[in-house]
Amino acid sequence: MELLKKRKVRPTPEQKRKRRYRFFQIGFFVLLAVLGTTVFLNYDYWLFKILIADHYIFTDTLDVLYKDAVGAENFKGYRRDFDRFVIAAATEKIRSVNNDRYTSLYTPQNYTYLVEAEKSDAKNAYLKELTGETVYMYLPNISTGTREFVYGNRETLLRYKNLVLDLRGNYGGLLADFYSVAELFTPKGAVLGHEVTRLKFLTHAVTATRDPYFSFEKIIILQDANTASASEGLILALKQNVNHVTTLGEKSFGKGIGQVRLPLTGGYAVNATVLLVQGPDGNTVHNAGIIPDVAGKPGGDLIQQALALVGQAP
């Protein structure tokens, strides 16, 4: 018995034409709806931009404001630089109200300097042996460079029973790098900190995802008034998750907020505070700082005091 095969009916050229035309119509009206919504949502801003950039009569005033915002060397024109001028003005107003100096527009020169300074500072990280059982590690910031430094020296650090971790002057850095370093010390599943945002579904606790690499008998952390931000987060993560951690020195800076830095066109970047960063226990150090377990002796050598705390003072 022969199997009957159904012949596939091919659309006629006329049907193909109508189908393409229908797709074109749908696409056209979708595009029109998107453009209409965009115009509606930005109508006030675009009118203001045209009014100021193209028609404001006191151009000498615009010259001062624009060049203050973007730098005289970067100025391209009132309309071309209007968005950057507005960002600079808005972030300056934010800073003037709540003293949030971290929310700002970076000019290309400032942005390049910031990135290069972070890389340059990270190169100052170093290790040295204090005694046969105690090693000293200095981290100038929390960045990709210092994270790589710590990971690159794991085998050396494993040779010692005790660690003196110097975070004096450490102004912080990237939260992701702080978490990555903290994971080397903390148990798997330990809460390293909390990130609180305006969007509740983005608010979450950050936990260690691997088993600890180090198991020092004693860790002494040196801190001062310039120990800030992600370095304070590192202190809290170790203090609240690892045994035998002692802080020594001065009260830390007290920066419990986090920023997002977005590159813009033309080499610019905008930085904005978008996170409240809390310790593992849910408390914040913002505007409070971390009080050390042991106050540093005025004019004393903190490294020698640290050795005394691990019972190895010379």
Image (cartoon, rainbow, N blue to C red):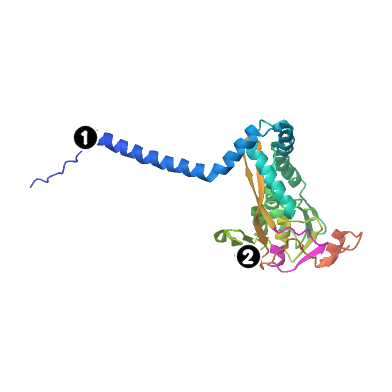
Q: Residue at x 39, y 41 (%)?
A: 29
Give the class, few, some or many, for how many residues have Cα within 10 Å of label 2's Cα (few <14, many ≥20). many
Q: Residue furthest front?
A: 57
160 on left or right of 19: right
Q: Which residues are magenta?
A: 236-256
Q: CA distance from mark 2 to mark 1?
A: 65 Å
Give the vertical position of 25 relative to 103 (above or below). Answer: above
Other residues around mark 1 within 10 Å, as few (<14) / some (14–19) / many (≥20): few
Q: Which label's residue is closer to the chain start, 2 or 1?
A: 1
102 and 178: which is toward the camera: 102
Residue 80 visible in the snapshot = no
- The answer to whether the residue labelled 2 contacts the one labelled 1, judged by CB atoms less than 8 Å apart, is no
The three-letter code of the residue at mark 2 reads: Val
Closer to the camera, 296 or 86?
Answer: 86
Label 1: element kind: loop
**Is residue 202 in view from this perspective?**
yes
The numbered disc on residue 12 is 1
**How many numbered circles does the render carry?**
2
Left or right of residue 107, residue 30 in this image: left
Q: Nearer the viewer, mark 2 or mark 1?
A: 1
Horizontal and vertical percent position of residue 297: 89, 63
- Residue 196 lies, in percent from the top left, at 62, 60
